Amino acid sequence: MAMYVGLMTAMAAFVGGLAIVAKTLLWGDQVAGWPTMMVVILLWAACS
């Protein structure tokens, strides 16, 4: 059960990271460094 919850959380973090990257590439970076920091935090949280 815990494995499935972790897998779903990791997938959500990955999709969220892709959305942030796509939004930044399409519309630019409103706050400097925010997209990079969020993607790193999401991926780090998913892997731990």
Image (spheres, rainbow, N blue to C red):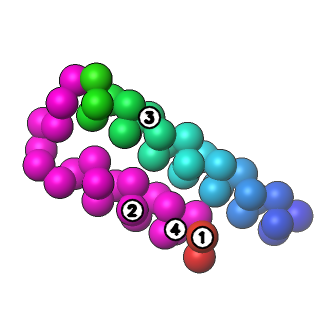
- Amino acid type shown at disc 4: Ala
The image quadrant of residue 24 is top left
Q: Earlier in the sequence, mark 2 or mark 1?
A: 2
Q: Earlier in the sequence, mark 2 or mark 3?
A: 3
Is residue 26 shown above or below 44? above
- Do the residues under discs 1 and 3 have CB atoms within 8 angstroms? no
Q: Earlier in the sequence, mark 2 or mark 4?
A: 2
Q: Position of residue 23 (x, y in %)?
A: 32, 29
Residue numbers of the magenta segment: 27-46
- Do the residues under discs 4 and 1 have CB atoms within 8 angstroms? yes
* Left or right placement of residue 45 versus residue 33 in this view: right
* Left or right placement of residue 28 versus residue 43 in this view: left
Distance of mark 3 from mark 4, alpha carbons?
17 Å
For disc 4, the marked residue is: 45
* Left or right placement of residue 16 versus residue 28 in this view: right
| Of 40 and 6, the residue lying toward us | 40
Q: Position of residue 9 (x, y in %)?
A: 64, 55
- Considering the numbered disc 4 on the image, is that residue within a helix, a strand or a loop? helix
- Amino acid type shown at disc 3: Ala
